[in-house]
Image: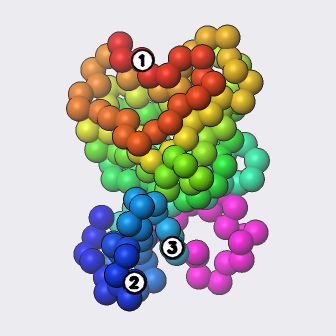
Amino acid sequence: LGQSVANPNANTARIGTSATNYMELTSDRRLTNLATPTGSSDAATKGYVDSTAPFTIVRSTGGDDTATLQAAIDAQANGIILLPDANYTISSGITLTGKTGLVLMGSGWYGGTQISWTGTSGTCFTFSGCYHSGLERMYIRGINIPASGFGVVFTSNCFLCHVEMVRIDFCYNGIQIS
């Protein structure tokens, strides 16, 4: 992600490239202190995508986050897309196609990053033809309890992909590897 930056708090690991462009990983494995864009208020950062960092930060819009998240994924070939503490609403499937080394990383599945899947069928996250890509540290929760579908699907030609520290509830099925 970058070089270590001097950290005054011994209970966290700070990762980034400067004193203002960093994230912290706390001792309980939660991501915190993701820098707010300079001069921005909380209201102005809704739906904000910062790709100038050594990682991309996608903030919740407070509404349907499907288009914002899909656009960030489509624009980034590899690396980490960070989803800070928030409730992200996804109304239609998010697809990662042909990505190498792209990880969607939340801030933690317990009280951190929640993906609220409002679709009534289909899959929340689909990985197709990806290599070394995955989901980490988030909670995927079906809101409408679909009659079919999955929380996460890895289709053919996915290699060394992963789901780590992800809780999936009420998505009809959890994870499919096909």
Residue type at mark 2? Asn
Rendered view: 97 above or below 100: above
Report the predominant secondary structure element of the magenta stretch: loop
Q: Is residue 170 left or right of residue 163?
A: right
Which dot, 1 or 2, sits closer to the camera? 2
Rendered view: 50 above or below 22: above
Rendered view: 92 above or below 31: above
Quarter of the image containing the C terminus?
Answer: top left
Q: Residue at x 65, y 83 (%)?
A: 39
Residues under numbered marks 1 and 2 in contact, where contact means CB atoms less than 8 Å apart: no
Judging by the rendered image, the residue that carries numbered circle 3 is: 33
Residue type at mark 3? Asn
Answer whether residue 137 is magenta in the image. Answer: no
For the residue pair 47 and 77, the one nearer the viewer reads as 47
Judging by the rendered image, the residue that carries numbered circle 1 is: 176
Answer whether residue 51 is magenta in the image. Answer: yes
Q: Can you see residue 99?
A: no
Q: Can you see residue 31?
A: yes
Q: Which mark is residue 9?
A: 2
Q: Residue at x 52, y 46 (%)?
A: 109
Query: Magenta stretch?
Result: 36-52
Residue type at mark 1? Gln
Quarter of the image containing the N terminus?
Answer: bottom left
Mark closest to the chain's N terminus, 2 or 3: 2
Q: Residue at x 46, y 63 (%)?
A: 31
Mark closest to the chain's N terminus, 1 or 2: 2
Q: Is residue 6 left or right of residue 48?
A: left
